[in-house]
Image: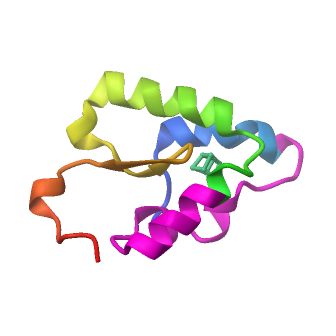
Amino acid sequence: MRTRTDPLTVATRKLTDQHQSPPCRTDPDAWFSEHRATIAEAIEACHRCPVIEQCRQAAADHVATHGPAHTYGVWAGVHHRGHAHTRKAVS
Ligand code: SF4
């Protein structure tokens, strides 16, 4: 099972304090899937997430710090491809 990186941990701390869990904590692998249907489901779940605004800021901070090539997976309803040229095509 994959775990989310530190920026997202910061974004979800609020929910942890409220004894809630964002959807990506339930099935983290779906947020890093290479299958189009699974990615679409993750994006849809993000749009119901109560910390999407914090997550969006965390994603922006992550991209600014590490660059888009080092940002992979669904963050705040946006699919980041990272090193897409080294990965399999989305099916
Ligand atoms: S917006 Fe999506 S990626 Fe961000 S914490 Fe919520 S479910 Fe996870």
Q: In the rendered image of this protein, does residue 30 appear above or below residue 9?
A: below
Residue 51 visible here: yes
The furthest residue to the left: 85
Residue 28 visible here: no
**Magenta region, residue range:** 17-44
Q: In the rendered image of this protein, does residue 65 appear above or below residue 46?
A: above
Residue shown at the point (78%, 43%) measured from the top left:
50
Q: In the rendered image of this protein, does residue 41 appear above or below residue 21?
A: below
Q: Which quarter of the rendering shows the C terminus?
A: bottom left
Q: In the rendered image of this protein, does residue 90 appear above or below residue 76?
A: below
Residue 35: quarter of image: bottom left
Could you say which is closer to the camera, residue 1 or residue 88?
88
Q: What kind of secondary structure does the magenta stretch mostly adopt? A: helix
Residue 73: quarter of image: bottom left
Residue 90 located left or right of residue 74: left
Could you say which is closer to the camera, residue 13 or residue 70?
70
Residue shown at the point (72%, 39%) measured from the top left:
51
Q: Is residue 31 magenta?
A: yes
Residue shown at the point (49%, 59%) measured from the top left:
3
Residue 74 located left or right of residue 49: left
**x then y, percent, for residue 22:** 72, 54
Residue shown at the point (76%, 56%) measured from the top left:
21
